[in-house]
């Protein structure tokens, strides 16, 4: 019976951790071992996927898994990304579309230009983030560990004092030793040591299945008390895919140069422009945080970014609700309008956040005229546009000074300082690398539902952590006096200790149950006035 209880407790702990790691293991195994790389003569050669690098051309037949992240050069197909991005329906892709390693090519033959190979694919990023999340230690975990370390000498001292106390009262050496042994067994800190880490592991696994990759060990604890969620607009509430709007007098040469320069930027507006690029990216490009990118051409300095950065003005023939990106080459300027698409479930997520008593705001670097239609469509009354990175930080600091706990959700390079200033931060996987590195968690796919899942999961995990700590403390407050008083035998003490461990582990497994979230919309709506 004793061995059964001991092994049952260890099994439950092991099973909770195994389930979480198995999710990442299954995804990492999705990528095939070999890929067909096209040689200079256009003949496909079978090579290991680890040998693929940026710029390689690969051929993906119907029914094959993609071996590297890439961009479709030719062909059209329906790609199944369910186990990577969480999207249940196959995605139709054609020239210019991005495809991730591990995706299953459904119907057509695709030729891809590799953008990330080897260990730099999205799958590898997922694996690294999950490994880091499982090994990270939050404040509750560190507290439990400190208590457990201090607990050991106190327990030994209590057992020794118990034996001496009973010897002084005239008990036999055997009885005094048995009481001391019972005290040592019943106060074994298994329940206390398991109270928090198992909850963290199970909750991390739940969020991973919901499409959220935890990057900071204490993210769950910092997210639970959040009462305000601040969204960036471009690339966060909207998708990177967009429709270009050009002024009537647009110079095709300037547009071509702007598209090539956009290849060097991860800003969503630049990403949308880069899809029309013909040719390779420029060799030496400097990124100016919160402004744009710069390179040197024979004609002079070329800039791509905000209107202020390029010293340009909005043309009168562009729609007022478009987001704008400007290109400057010497004295020549081109302003490009981009009509963005709202994420399919954005309104449902915003409504669900409000229903939970959470205030929702938009802080965007885009023009107020472009932010207003998005805010109106999503039912967000509190929004600001035309903000620089310093303005976003000031707005967040003002909210924090008023006593609010703020979560920032953003993806652009200009959002990185704001993400650092917030109490907790999230970023989509399509965001800039520095933004993802700054964020406490990264969500994948084209939906915002992981943001809501993160909040619900954090609140559930926090509640279960506190419950487990309370259970462990109450157990010791009741069990220790009984053991010191001699009412507990070593066998009963062992059963009680194992039972308490099983109890906190079973309670922790509740963190893996999914709460009902908002039903995502089935279409993606274009932002219009």
Image (spheres, rainbow, N blue to C red):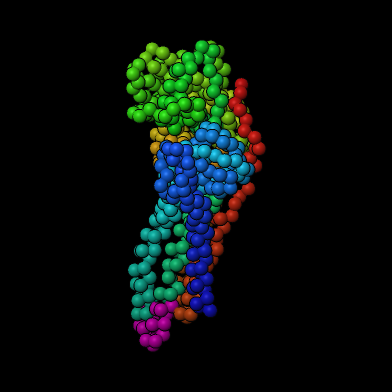
**Can see residue 401?**
no
Nearer-the-camera pick, 30 or 465: 30
Residue 179 among magenta residues: yes
**Can see residue 528?**
yes
149 vs 514, left or right, is left
391 vs 249, left or right, is left
Tell me which secondary structure the magenta stretch mostly adopts.
helix
Q: What stretch is highlighted in magenta?
A: 165-182
Q: At 45% across and 67% down in the image, what residue appears?
A: 190
x and y, in percent, of residue 53 in the image: 41, 42
x and y, in percent, of residue 181 in the image: 41, 79
Q: Is residue 371 above or below residue 67?
A: above
Nearer-the-camera pick, 49 or 135: 49
Nearer-the-camera pick, 4 or 28: 28
Q: In this view, does 412 lie above or below 517?
A: above
Residue 480 among magenta residues: no
Q: How many labels does the image show?
A: 0
Q: In this view, does 301 lie above or below 487?
A: above
Q: At 37% across and 86% down in the image, what residue appears?
A: 173
x and y, in percent, of residue 338 in the image: 53, 23
x and y, in percent, of residue 182 in the image: 43, 78
271 vs 519, left or right, is left
Nearer-the-camera pick, 410 or 44: 44
Q: At 45% across and 38% down in the image, what residue appears?
A: 41
Q: In which quarter of the image is the C terminus?
A: top right
88 vs 421, left or right, is right
Q: In this view, does 446 lie above or below 498?
A: above
Q: At 42% across and 80% down in the image, what residue appears?
A: 179
- Residue 148: which quarter of the image? bottom left
């Amino acid at each position: 019976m004793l061995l059964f209880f001991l092994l049952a407790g260890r099994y439950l702990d092991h099973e909770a951790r195994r389930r979480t790691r198995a999710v990442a293991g299954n995804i990492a195994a999705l990528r095939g071992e070999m890929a067909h790389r096209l040689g200079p003569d256009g003949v496909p050669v079978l090579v290991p996927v680890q040998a693929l690098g940026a710029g390689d051309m690969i051929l993906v037949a119907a029914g094959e898994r993609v071996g590297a992240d890439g961009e479709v050069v030719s062909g059209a197909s329906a790609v199944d990304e369910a186990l990577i991005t969480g999207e249940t329906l196959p995605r139709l892709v054609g020239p210019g579309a991005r495809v991730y390693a591990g995706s299953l090519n459904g119907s057509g033959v695709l030729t891809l230009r590799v953008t990330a190979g080897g260990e730099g694919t999205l799958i590898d990023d997922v694996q690294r983030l999950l490994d880091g999340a499982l090994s990270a230690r939050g404040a509750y975990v560190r507290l439990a560990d400190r208590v457990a370390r201090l607990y050991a000498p106190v327990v030994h001292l209590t057992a020794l004092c118990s034996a001496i106390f009973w010897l002084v009262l005239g008990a036999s050496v055997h009885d005094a030793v048995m009481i001391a042994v019972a005290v040592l067994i019943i106060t074994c800190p298994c329940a206390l040591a398991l109270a928090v880490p198992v909850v963290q592991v199970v909750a991390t696994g739940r969020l991973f299945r919901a499409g959220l990759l935890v990057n900071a060990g204490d993210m769950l604890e910092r997210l639970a008390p959040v009462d305000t969620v601040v969204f960036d607009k471009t690339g966060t509430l909207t998708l990177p895919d967009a429709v270009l709007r050009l002024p009537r007098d647009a110079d095709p040469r300037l547009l071509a140069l702007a598209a090539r320069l956009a290849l060097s930027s991860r800003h969503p507006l630049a990403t949308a422009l880069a899809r029309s690029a013909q040719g390779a990216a420029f060799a030496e490009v400097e990124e100016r945080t919160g402004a744009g990118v710069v390179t040197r051409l024979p004609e002079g300095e070329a800039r791509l970014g905000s209107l202020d950065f390029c010293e340009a003005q909005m043309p009168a023939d562009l729609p007022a609700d478009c987001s704008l990106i400007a290109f400057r080459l010497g004295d020549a300027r081109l302003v490009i309008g981009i009509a963005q698409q709202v994420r399919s479930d954005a309104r449902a997520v915003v409504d669900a956040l409000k229903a939970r008593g959470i205030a929702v705001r938009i802080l965007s670097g885009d023009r107020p005229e472009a932010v207003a239609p998005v805010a109106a469509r999503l039912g967000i009354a509190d929004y600001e546009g035309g903000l620089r990175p310093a303005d976003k930080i000031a707005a967040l600091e003002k909210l924090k000074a008023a006593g609010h706990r703020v979560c920032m959700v953003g993806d652009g390079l200009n959002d990185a300082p704001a993400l650092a200033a917030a109490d907790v931060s999230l970023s989509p996987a399509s965001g800039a690398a520095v933004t993802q590195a700054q964020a406490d968690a990264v969500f994948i796919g084209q939906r915002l539902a992981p943001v809501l899942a993160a909040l619900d999961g954090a609140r559930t995990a926090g509640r279960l952590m506190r419950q487990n700590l309370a259970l462990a403390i109450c157990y010791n407050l009741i069990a220790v006096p009984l053991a010191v008083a001699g009412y507990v035998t070593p066998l009963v003490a062992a059963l009680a200790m194992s039972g308490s461990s099983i109890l906190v582990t079973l309670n922790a497994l509740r963190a893996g149950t999914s709460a009902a979230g908002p039903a995502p919309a089935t279409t993606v709506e274009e932002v219009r006035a």
